[in-house]
């Protein structure tokens, strides 16, 4: 065992500080959700030592029907993430395998699309979905998968595939593999970590999407979890623990997926399957 | 495993593609806004209506009233309005003047279950246009005075009587404003009130002044009379001279409702909406009293929401049937159970469904008594903008007297800012 040097200590300390910055809101969220309902909000931040109660979670399920929204969120994520990954990965592979000029053109197109504010597209999208009679269904929420969830994912895949040695694809081509075969048998297995990380981010983006459901879904039966929990936003001070409990319910699945993927990515990075 | 996954995706796709089925198309779409407890009450009304054989109701729940206005405007502009929506009279003028609202007078006249005379007249009047009932009120509250009975008892002051004057209130507020630990910071303030025109207006009216030149045909802000100026000056002095209300910084860091909840405020001017929150108070007794009078007669201000129907509602008949249930005795009793609203139907308001013996406030009767002397602000299209303009100046004068103009200049500034917003301005 080698004693860590000064640089190692500094790096560890920096990591702890960054982790603490990101963990603090999560801890406050958790602690706040267990505060008894009905108490005036604390005047200063509370961490530990306050009164504890599960009342907020009980009241949450009384105030907001969460089963249907949870199922809707699950459906949207279960469909959007795999299709989005497939589209983004294919598009990225195509951009990487094209000659430099065409590949650069595709990548530049993705960057331009990425720069367009999403909010400026909502009116047009809403008109299209309304004309097609698809509002108040989950289709508009799933439709983002057809562009790979985000153009950024296409770019990341393209960069990842471009980093692979071109000789690999030359050999694969000599062995008679089709472009699809090269993607499936060569490119994808070698970028497993990137794919897992993008899957996690795509899941979090889809799972947490509030604006999309707010615009396309007015039927409460089609509401997703963030939209349903959003109805708690008007909670007064003593009922804020209920709103925080709702936020915990939304955050936990995304956190679980992130942790699982992080573990997977670490294993890949260490060279284990 | 793979087959199961494929099957799940197929089922999921089928479910995701399912829009509202043909049987759902006759659903009444009702847009409502409110806090979670209020939304729960609306869901209970919709469920009770469905259980009574009335048919399905789809609630379009909005978490905030500001968002309701924008969502409603967008839906109407897009030609996809709800069949009914719940709206405050101060915000309904813009929809009425745009011709977006259907008259309910004919349906009300023909109704076998609703009688116009059974509603509080002040609330009905606020939603009338040219003699026609445009919307039907769902609630009829007013501004009252909440007080912490424990703090009054500790200070040896009698709780507010029915005929309380402004000076009585200020004197009590001064006594109740205390720095308990002597650190130079006030621990308990005597009074909490937002510096807004809807808070000042009752006292202008009570003092014999007017807010606008003509309630039926408002053309300008008429607060330049001596009586109105005296009332406004008295209001501003609550912070500037008496120091009985929290400072700007204190009000920003802790809202008045929360301050009252933790016992840091002896009195609070608010409408009925805080009752569900205050019912969670365990540390002290509290109750409500009528607003004090500044002049010879006490006057309060109406707070009322009504169900309105857009002219191009998809299912007007079904919507009206739901409205008849929601505003009938059963529907209003369910809504009253949440404690947040005062029923607009007089019979329900005077029943145990609202007065709820044993539940605080014990003096809920004051909400009903005040409705006989309540007044409304105009419901013209740009009234919300007028309120915003006046409130900005009022807030500055209330909290920042050092940079704010004197009262006559303040009134002139209010008139200057609002003149273009009135009809013909």
Image (cartoon, coloured by chain):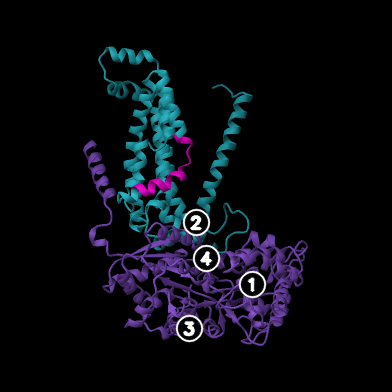
> Does the CB distance between marks 2 and 3 fall below 8 Å?
no
Q: From the image, tell me which residue sits under label 1.
A: B221
- Distance between the Cα atoms at labels 1 and 2? 50 Å
- Residue B144 image offset from top left, x and y in percent: 58, 77
- Residue B314 image offset from top left, x and y in percent: 32, 64
- Distance between the Cα atoms at labels 2 and 3? 46 Å
Chain letter matching colour cyan? A
- Give the number of the mark in front: 2 or 4: 4
Say whether mark 4 and mark 3 are on the same chain: no
Instruction: Decide: few, some or many residues near mark 4? Use Cα within 10 Å; few <14, some 14-19, many ≥20.
Output: many
Q: From the image, tell me which residue sits under label 3.
A: B121
Q: Can you see residue B156?
A: no
Say whether mark 2 and mark 1 are on the same chain: no
- The majority secondary structure of the magenta stretch comes to helix
Give the position of the N terminus of chain B as an image quadrant.
top left
- Give the number of the mark in front: 1 or 2: 1
Question: What residue is shown at x 40% (from left), y 78% (from top)?
Answer: B333
- Give the number of the mark in front: 3 or 4: 3
Instruction: Decide: few, some or many residues near mark 3? Use Cα within 10 Å; few <14, some 14-19, many ≥20.
Output: some
Does the magenta run of residues contain A117?
A: yes
The image's mark for residue A34 is 2
Span highlighted in magenta in the image: A113-128
Q: From the image, tell me which residue sits under label 4.
A: A38
Secondary-structure class at tag 3? helix
Residue B9 in the figure: left or right of residue B219: left
The shade of chain B is purple
Instruction: Decide: few, some or many residues near mark 1? Use Cα within 10 Å; few <14, some 14-19, many ≥20.
Output: many
């Amino acid at each position: 065992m080698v004693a860590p040097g000064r640089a190692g200590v500094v790096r560890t300390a920096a990591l702890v500080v960054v982790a603490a910055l990101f963990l603090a809101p999560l801890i406050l969220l958790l602690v706040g959700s267990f505060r008894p309902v009905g108490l005036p909000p604390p005047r200063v931040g509370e961490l530990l030592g306050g009164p504890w109660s599960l009342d907020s979670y009980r009241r949450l399920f009384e105030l907001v029907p969460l089963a249907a929204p949870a199922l809707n969120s699950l459906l949207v994520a279960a469909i959007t993430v795999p299709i989005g990954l497939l589209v983004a990965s294919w598009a990225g592979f195509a951009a990487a395998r094209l000659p430099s000029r065409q590949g650069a053109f595709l990548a530049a197109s993705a960057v331009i699309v990425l720069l367009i504010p999403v909010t400026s597209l909502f009116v047009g999208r809403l008109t299209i979905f309304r004309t097609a009679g698809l509002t108040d269904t989950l289709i508009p929420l799933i439709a983002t998968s057809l562009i790979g969830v985000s153009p950024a994912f296409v770019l990341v895949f393209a960069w990842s595939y471009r980093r692979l040695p071109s000789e690999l694809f030359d050999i694969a081509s000599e062995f008679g593999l089709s472009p699809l075969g090269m993607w499936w048998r060569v490119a994808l297995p070698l970028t497993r970590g990137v794919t897992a990380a993008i899957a996690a981010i795509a899941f979090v983006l889809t799972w947490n999407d509030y604006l999309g459901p707010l615009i396309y879904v007015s039927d409460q039966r089609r509401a997703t979890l963030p939209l349903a929990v959003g109805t708690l936003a008007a909670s007064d001070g003593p009922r804020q623990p209920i709103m925080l409990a709702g936020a915990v319910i939304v955050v936990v699945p995304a956190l679980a997926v992130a942790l699982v993927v992080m573990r997977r990515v670490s294993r890949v990075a260490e060279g284990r399957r | 495993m793979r087959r199961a996954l494929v099957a799940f995706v197929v089922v999921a796709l089928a479910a995701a593609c399912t829009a509202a089925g043909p049987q759902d198309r006759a659903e009444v779409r009702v847009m409502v806004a409110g806090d979670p407890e209020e939304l729960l009450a609306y869901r209970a009304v919709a469920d009770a209506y469905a259980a009574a054989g009335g048919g399905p109701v789809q609630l379009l729940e909005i978490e905030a009233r500001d968002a309701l206005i924008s969502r409603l405007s967008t839906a109407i502009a897009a030609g996809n309005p709800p069949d009914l929506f719940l709206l405050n009279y101060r915000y309904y003028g813009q929809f009425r003047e745009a011709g977006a609202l259907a008259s309910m007078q004919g349906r009300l006249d023909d109704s076998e279950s609703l009688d116009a005379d059974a509603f509080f007249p002040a609330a009905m009047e606020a939603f009338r246009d040219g003699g026609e009932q445009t919307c039907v009120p769902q609630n009829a509250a007013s501004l009252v005075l909440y007080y912490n009975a424990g703090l009054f008892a500790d200070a040896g002051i009698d709780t507010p009587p029915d005929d309380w004057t402004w000076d009585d209130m200020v004197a009590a507020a001064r006594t109740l404003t205390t720095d308990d630990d002597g650190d130079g910071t006030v621990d308990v303030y005597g009074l909490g009130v937002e510096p807004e025109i809807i808070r000042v207006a009752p006292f202008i009216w009570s003092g014999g002044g007017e807010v606008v030149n003509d309630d039926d045909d408002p053309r300008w802000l008429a607060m330049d009379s001596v009586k109105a100026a005296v009332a406004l000056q008295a209001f501003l002095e609550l912070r500037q001279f008496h120091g009985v209300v929290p400072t700007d910084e204190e009000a920003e860091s802790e809202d008045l409702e929360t301050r009252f909840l933790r016992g840091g405020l002896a009195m609070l001017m608010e409408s009925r909406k805080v009752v569900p929150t205050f019912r969670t108070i365990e540390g002290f007794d509290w109750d409500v009293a009528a607003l004090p009078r500044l002049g010879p007669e006490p006057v309060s201000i109406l707070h009322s929401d009504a169900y309105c129907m857009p002219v191009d509602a998809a299912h007007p008949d079904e919507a009206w049937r739901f409205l008849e249930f929601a505003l009938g005795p059963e529907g209003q009793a369910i809504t009253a159970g949440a404690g947040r609203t005062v029923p607009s139907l007089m019979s329900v308001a005077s029943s145990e469904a609202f007065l709820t013996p044993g539940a605080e406030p014990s003096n809920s009767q004051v909400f009903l008594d005040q409705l006989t002397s309540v007044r409304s602000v105009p419901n013209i299209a740009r009234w919300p903008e007028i309120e915003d303009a006046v409130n900005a100046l009022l807030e500055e004068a209330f909290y920042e007297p050092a940079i704010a103009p004197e009262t006559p200049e303040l009134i002139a500034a209010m008139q200057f800012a609002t003149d273009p917003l009135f009809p013909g301005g």
